Structure formats: structure tokens, C-alpha cells
Amino acid sequence: MNGIENNSGLEALVWIANYYQKNVTKDQLMHAIGMHALSPTDWELRECAHIIGYETEITLLDTSNIHDVPLPALIYLNGFWRILSKDKSNELILINPINNEFIHWHERHSTYPESLTLLLIKEQFETEKKTTFGISWFIPSILRQRSQLKNVFILAAIVQIFALISPLFFQNVIDKVLVGRSLNSLQVLAIGIVGLAFAEPIYSFLRNKIFSYTSTQISAELSGKLYRHLMALPLDYFKQRPTGKIIARIREMTRIRQFLTGSTLMLFIDLVFVILFMAVLFSYSVVMSWILMGSLALFCILWMILGPIIRLHTEKSYQADENSLTFLTEAMTGIETIKTTATEKYVYRRWQKRLSKQLIQGFKVTLRSIVATQLMTLVSKITTALLLWIGVKEVMSGGMTAGELVAYNMLSAHVTQPVLRLAQIWQDFQHTIISLRRVGDILDEPIENERKGITSSASIQGNIDFHNIRFRYHPETPEVLCNLTLTIKAGEFIGITGPSGSGKSTLTKLLQRLYIPQQGQVIVDGMDLAVSDTIALRRRMSVVLQESQLFVGTIEENIRLSHPHASHEEVIEAATLAGAYDFIMSLPDNFNYPVSECGLNLSGGQRQRIALARALLTKPDILILDEATSALDYDSEAAIMKNMPLITKGRTVISIAHRLNTIQYADRICVIRDGEIAEIDTHPNLLQKNGVYAHLWRQQTQ
């Protein structure tokens, strides 16, 4: 069962959530996991349950054992999910989550199949323990593929048995055929060797195919976990780090994945069989085997000496690589500024310096890795020469046959080759240690408080209270907001203005929970945002910034970003309200016009109107306009201002503006200066007071 043809699974989860007294809606669940279709897959259904705070397990259960199931549970019947529970008389019932009707299990159970799919649900009462990111973070993902890894291990064991048998064939060819001149033995051995020649590649192919598939599954899960965590980090994390540095750390996950799911895992499987090969080798010659063991000990000593040296230079190389990527990202982002200031040569020289440092550090790592590899190879060659010398002496003295010597050398290769590969893996491990530390910068960072121990509401009225708010971006910087208190009534259109840096935009960011005040409370409809569901809260708000971001796709896809299921008619309505419809219809393909990266193939005013349409499409309870019309020409601004009564109708609107004509008809206008409220009143009353607002108005109108 890969997918469900209806949304009964989501309805059933909402029913279960209400059973546990949690305020959850189907729409919230769909948005939380980014569902675009109304039919959730099994994985999406379990992900939704995890978001609410449940542990889940999908199982195929015999109906005879149905009374042993922990309740309530979800059961899949005839293409629909139902809730399996008990009534007051302790009898099993099936509940339809859509209309809440139920039937008793005993009335229909004879018509059901013998085996049914159940989704078992258990509430997570214990809080998750915070663990530092490391190798243990990957173990659950690897263990989930244990059935496939078991198959890989079995096939690897068969391949290793072939590797063990093959030298024995050659030993018998030399001792019985060449020395004993037995042609009958030759025919039998030849058939065996040909059989091995065909069988070994087939089993090796199957092993590598299954292992490659398993590695892909593990890699996909690990990448998904990293990206989900990254997207859940607070805005402050991204503000404090250059984009290039974050991208560089994400790239490190590729190194870790390759280390864990590449040749490393296969090597450890091979190393298990090294013990078996060593036991066989000791049966041939104790002296030669101790020499081989001594070489392995020497390998370990070399690793211990060279490992820290390689790791030190690798860390410097990674840092240089990160600096280069950060600078390149900045240059590409600010290419227009570089062009307009004619500083291409200057930027190029700065880039060359960083590139030079990166290449020098990379060369140092490569040089030391080459030295380490060659030392390992030297030990290996000396060991081979010693084994050959002692082996020949053993043959000449009659201690072993020529066939046994050949077999010994073939078997010893199956010991030394994995160990030599382990030397390369050891170097990769030094890189991986550094990568773990750098990726840990992302995964050790706590995510935003989304759902655990919080309250949420499907809709909000829009009453907002800022109570004694104090906020600064960093401990060493001055306060941006100083003991600010402001009350906004539901449905009120309030304008906020003031000098640059006075804290206007910061106030709205606190409302969106993008930042957390050091002191004071932000309250919406009587609910403190400190215990609110951040995602649910933001879904009931829409924000239009001075520089709104558009993404690669069509215009309609950009408008639908926060409401993927909106109809085309709703998109047109939002575009018309935002004053964007006319210019969209003048473009080739209209709403299907392709938008380039960041919307650079559109003008600033066009991007702004698309962003406003996107904000209005969700029909938000709170609308925040942060200098939303600053990039518009006067005609476009006039079109939006004409629709402002419709835009503000039935919702709380906060409009931040320097152009005071855009907020003069607001219910109230708040003037913020130096992090405090300097004035707050209607436009006419503020002009009569002849204060800060009146001064700003005269500057713009006279």
C-alpha cells in the first residue's frame, strides 16, 4: 500500500489528536510536511503522526489477534482508514473519522480479510534527550536497512568463501597435477576453477547491487534529516553566518555519507573474514603468519603517527575551502554592485588570494597522504619479500609444498589488501572527523519550538499585545526596543513609522517569532507566543517585505507558495487585489510566465505585487506590510491604495512605511523613535499635535 486514495488517514489522525486533547487540523498537518496531494502515503501519514507527537508502527495483523491491539489505533479497511477503539461497554468499535459514526467490530468482522493493515499509535510522553551530533546520529538510519545489509553480508560471505576455495584449487593443481602428474585430477580441478570463475562475479554483482541500493536509501534519509533540521533552525542562525559557510557545511554531509555508505561499510564486512583467513594461514606456517601479523601491527603504528598530522592539515584545507566558497557566494550575490562600481579586478585579486591559500592547503594534505600511502606500500612490499624468502626456504627444506606456498601467498593477499584499504579509509576517517564537527554546527543547533508542550489555534482574531518589550540583537549591541508597550485591536489597521533603525521591523519580527525578546511578552488573542505553535502562528500571518523573495518557477507557483491547493480563480482574485493582474496578463504565458532566480527577470515593482498577491491568497488573520510599496511607482501604489479597504477588511493589518501617504488612512499611526513609542494617534490628531509625525509629514508634502 503505497498511497491512499482519500484523506481519511489525515482525518483519523486529527480524531486521535482530539482524543488526546490536542488542537490540530488537517490543513496544519498537510502544511507541516509540505503535502501537495490530498492522498497521503504511508510515510507521510507516519510523518504527520510524528509531528503531532506520536510514535507509530505500521503492521500487518491477523484479525484473530485484533483484541490484543493497543487502542486507539488506525485500521485500513476497503480503501479507507478507520479508528479502532472501544465503547463504554468495552466492545471493539470502528469509527468513521469524517462523520464520527461507528459500528461494532463483531457486526462486520466476518466480511473483512484475514489480515489487515494497522497503524499503531503511542503518545510520546518523554521529552527527547538532546545528544551531540556524531557517528551515533547515523546509526538509526543504517539499522533501518538491516534486512538489506543482512543480504549483503550473506553474499559477501559467499564471495569470501570463493576467495578461500580458489587458492586451494591452485594448490592442488601444483601439488597433484604438476608434481604428481595426475591428468584426472587436472580435469576435476579445471571444472572447479571454471565454476568459480563464473560464480564469483555473479555473487559479487548481486552483493554490489544490493549494497548500492541500500547506500542510496541511507543517503536519501540522511540528506532529508539534515535539510529538515536546517529549515527548522531559527532565523538568527542564518543571520549570524555567511551563506557560503552554511553551504560548505552542508557539503560536508556528502563526505560523511560517502565514508559511511561507500567502501567503508564493505571493508568492515571484509575485515570480519580476515580473522578466518589468518586462521587458515596459521595452519600453513606459524612463522610466516607471525611476520604477517607484525606487518599489520606496523600499519597500526603508522596510522597512529600520521593520522593526527593529516587531520590537522585537512582541517586547515577545509577552512580555506570554506573561505573561498563564502567569498564566491558573496561575489555572485553582489555581482550588480561589483559591476556598477567597476571593481571586478579588485574582487578578482581577492579571490585569487583565497584560491591560492586553498590550493596550497590542499597540496599539503595531498602530499602527506601520499607519504602515508607510500609508507604503507613499502611495508607491504617488504612483507611480501620476507614471506616469499621464508616460504621458498620452507619448500626447499620440505616444510611445505610449492602448492602450499602459492596458496599461502594468494590467501595472504586477502589479509593485506583489506588492511591496505583500511589505510586509505583511515585517511578518509580523518576527513570525516572534521566533517562531523562542521556538520555538527548545524545539527547541534536547537530548532525553533514548533510543537512540544505548546498551544495552537486553527484561526486567530488578531488582538496583539506587546508588553514591556526589551530586545537587542547581540549582547554587546545597544537595545533596539526599550520597554515598549503597544496594544493592537483585532481588525485594526495600524501604521508604524519612524527613523531608520528605530525598531519598526524588529517589532514585527518579534510578532512572527523570528526573534525572541530578552524581556517582556508578545501576546496574540491572550496567548503568549512563548508557548505558541510557531508554524501554526505564521500560517495565520502574511508578510510582504521591502525586498520579497521569488523563486524559480511560474508566477502562479510563486503566488501559490503558501497555499498550493488554491484554485486558479483564487489566484486571479489575489493578483487583482494586489494590482498585479494587468501586468501578468501582458506577459507571455500570463500566469505561467517563468520566473528566474530571485525574480530578476521582473522589475522590483512587479516582484513586490506578486509578493503581495502571495500574502493575500492565504486570507491571513494578520497582514504585515513592511515597506511593501516602497519599490512601486506612483501608479502601481495608487492601484494598491485604492484596494486598501478590501485588503484590510476583516483582518489586523500592520503597515510599516516611510512614505506616510500610504498609512494616512490607518485607524492609528504609531511613531517609534529610539526603540520607544514617541506618538500614537490618528493622522489628523498627530498633525494637530505638531510633533515628530507632523514634522515628517511636512518634509514629505512640502
Image (cartoon, helix red, strand yellow):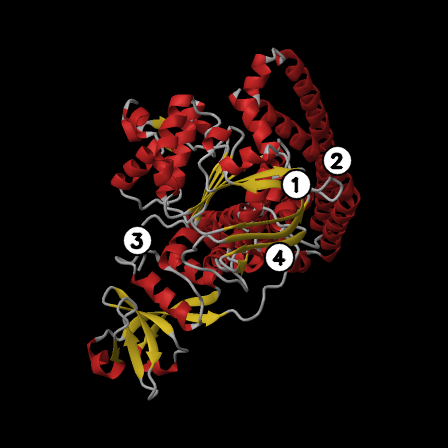
Q: Which mark is residue 38?
A: 3
**Residue appearing at x 44%, y 32% in the figure:** 550
In this figure, which residue is indicated by the disc labeled 4? 136
Is 574 placed left or right of 546 in the picture? left
Q: Give SS at disc 4.
A: helix
Q: Which mark is residue 191?
A: none
Please name whichever residue, 462 or 332, is drawn nearer the observer in this view of the structure.
462
Between discs 2 and 4, the one toward the N terminus: 4
Residue 385 x/y as whole percent: 72, 41
Circles 2, 3 touching at the beta carbon (< 8 Å): no
> Label 2, label 4: how many angstroms apart (C-alpha)?
26 Å
> Label 2, label 3: how many angstroms apart (C-alpha)?
52 Å
Please name whichever residue, 651 or 327, is drawn nearer the observer in this view of the structure.
651
What's the amino acid at mark 3?
A: Leu
For label 2, the crowd category at 10 Å Cα-Cα, with few meaning under 14, some 14 to 19 and many 20 or more, is many
Query: How many labels sit on residues?
Result: 4
In this figure, which residue is indicated by the disc labeled 2? 313
> Label 4, label 3: how many angstroms apart (C-alpha)?
36 Å
What's the amino acid at mark 4?
A: Ser
> Label 1, label 3: how many angstroms apart (C-alpha)?
46 Å
Between discs 1 and 3, the one toward the N terminus: 3
Circles 4, 1 touching at the beta carbon (< 8 Å): no
